[in-house]
Amino acid sequence: MTDIINQYLNYLTVRGLAQGTIRMYRSDLNQLSNFLQSKLDLDAITGITHTYLRYFFHSLSDLKLSKRSIARKISSIREFFKFCLNRDLIDKDPTRKLIYPKFSTKLPMVFTIQEMTDLINLPDTSTNYGKRDKAILEVMYSTGCRISELANIKLPDIDFDRCMIKVLGKGNKDRFVPIGKMAVIALKQYLSVRKSLFPYSRKSEMDVNKYLFISKNGNQLSSNVLRGIMNGYISQIAKTDGYTPHSIRHSFATHMLECGASLMTVKEILGHENVSTTEIYTRLSITYQKKAYSQYHPIIHSHRDQIEADFYNSAKQ
């Protein structure tokens, strides 16, 4: 089974899937393979049945995996067996009758516009690294890009004349996204001091200039390093747990819809394949609209004040 898994992973690489996605598939399939070998002494893919797969997914529940994680693993394994079936490696698909566990859709955590403003203003721009960090936050919020996309932005990808940035998205698909005035200003301030961030680097000028965001050694800032930088600032502004750098992307989409952008426009900027993925932000937007309505509508306020007064008077009687 190991050889077939490797064939499948090579196929995904040729298709241009992101390395993070391929690692996820590898982890899921290796977990299944190890389970079948250790529990059932089964290595041949032709011997895998629907019953054995149910046994595997039941074991994941015993490990306290969330229903969402199990559903993702079912999806990964289904795609693998579809690959095997299309190449006549198996006669029938054992995943065909697998049922996804039901789970409630959790709305993403979103910053308010004021919180995003406060977050972006946290870096100390009197320092060169502060200028870099502010540019990171500004570009992230201005474009709504993913962290991996932010890490892979290169200097030639920025078109200051058109206020656009080329982003390499999932499946190695390029898209051009607009960038706002404040992000342009932050980028230019960062670029004016960028070379001073790596005075002791042994890398050639050509190598160092490849990526937009770099470390003191002239290396590309990885997704994990960028995540750590942003988490440091988010921890200072978040009022509750659960906020992550990806919350900035969620905030971008929600704020765009709140301010009147069309769903299709937000879909294209975010790089979503399907508009249904973007629709969750309409639910967030409606949630915030209702909250604002109850807080600021004058009639609602007057009614609430009357209700509170009636309750207070009845309590005294």
Image (cartoon, helix red, strand yellow):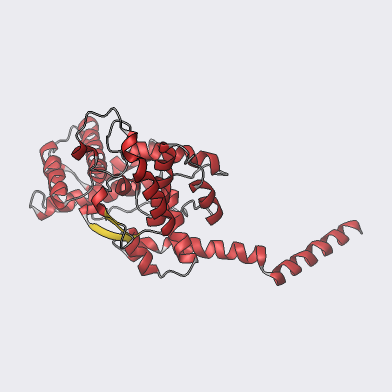
Q: Residue at x 32, y 48 (%)?
A: 150
Q: Position of residue 141 (x, y in %)?
A: 42, 53
User: Above or below — where is 193 with respect to 99?
Assistant: above
**Looking at this rendering, what residue extends furthest in the left direction?**
88
Q: Which quarter of the rendering shows the N terminus?
A: top left
The one nearer the camera, 144 or 284, is 144
Q: Mark yes or no: residue 67 visible.
A: no
Q: Position of residue 37 (x, y in %)?
A: 20, 32
Q: Quadrant of residue 209?
A: top left
Q: Position of residue 73 (x, y in %)?
A: 30, 46
The one nearer the camera, 6 or 195, is 195
**Looking at this rendering, what residue extends furthest in the bottom direction?**
299
**Looking at this rendering, what residue extends furthest in the right direction?**
317
User: Above or below — where is 253 with respect to 45?
Assistant: below
Q: Residue at x 39, y 40 (%)?
A: 227
The number of callouts visible is: 0
Q: Is residue 269 left or right of residue 289?
A: left
User: Above or below — where is 211 with respect to 284?
Assistant: above
Q: Mark yes or no: residue 50 visible.
A: yes
